Image (tube, rainbow, N blue to C red):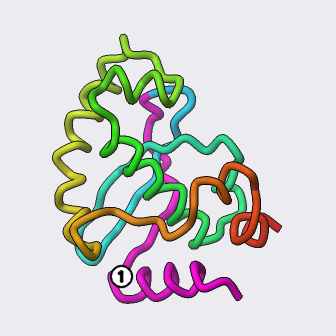
Amino acid sequence: MYPEIIDIQNFIANKGITICLNKGPHIEQNLIPVVLRIGNCIYTIHVSDEYEDLSYYNPILNFIIVFRALVAINESKDFLVWCKQEGLNPDNLKLLNYYKDICHTISNINSCFPNNEIDYFISDLDFQLNAGVMQFLRR
């Protein structure tokens, strides 16, 4: 077993995290709405699922997908940069409103993590190359 998996499992258990697909509307064709519950707080997060990881219905993969999406927003300099990085339409007003809302929400979510910084516990290289823990989870 990979230590990253154990760390994610422990974090999910300690924070009471659940993630499930949302039947709500898509604000952009390339984004899938998911419901993130952390304790008593509920958030709708729109994620890109380029590798169709959500189809595995694996809580660890779901965690990685959702929190990678939040980190991408948090690390983007602004809306236009985020749209370019994610291949999204910057003329979409629903997407702009989501971006503004989620930027405020991220500060609440950050507080759940050590050092007030979101962590999805795996390397981007493993994610993109389907190596290590990601290869194991995608079997």
Task: Identify the residue at image location x=49%, y=47%.
Answer: 23
Q: Position of residue 80 (x, y in %)?
A: 34, 20
Q: Quadrant of residue 124?
A: bottom right
Q: Does residue 104 sit above or below 6 in this rendering? A: above
Amino acid at circle 1: Gly
Residue where numbered disc 1 is placed: 16
Q: Quadrant of the N terminus?
A: bottom right
Q: Describe residue 46's horizontal placement relative to residue 78 as left or right.
A: right
Residue 108 falls within the magenta-colored stretch: no
Residue at the (56%, 63%) spot, across then down: 62
Magenta stretch containing residue 13, yes or no?
yes
Outermost right residue: 139
Q: Mark 1: which secondary structure?
A: loop
Q: Residue, x 36% and y 11% (percent of image)?
A: 91
Count of numbered badges drawn on the protein: 1
Q: Quadrant of residue 138?
A: bottom right
Task: Tell me residue 63's x, y (percent).
Answer: 50, 66
Q: Is residue 67 above or below residue 10?
A: above
- Which residues make up the magenta segment? 1-27
- Indicate left or right for 10 with 77 as reference: right
Left or right: 108 in relation to 73: left
Q: Nearer the viewer, residue 99 or 19?
A: 99
Where does the image place residue 139, in percent across and percent down from the top left? Answer: 83, 68
- Is residue 109 toward the left or the right of residue 64 in the image? left
Q: Residue at x 76, y 62 (%)?
A: 131
Name the one closer to the observer, 111 or 23. Answer: 111
Assess disc 1: are there few (<14), some (14-19) or many (≥20) residues with their C-alpha within 10 Å of its C-alpha: few
Residue 10 x/y as whole percent: 46, 88
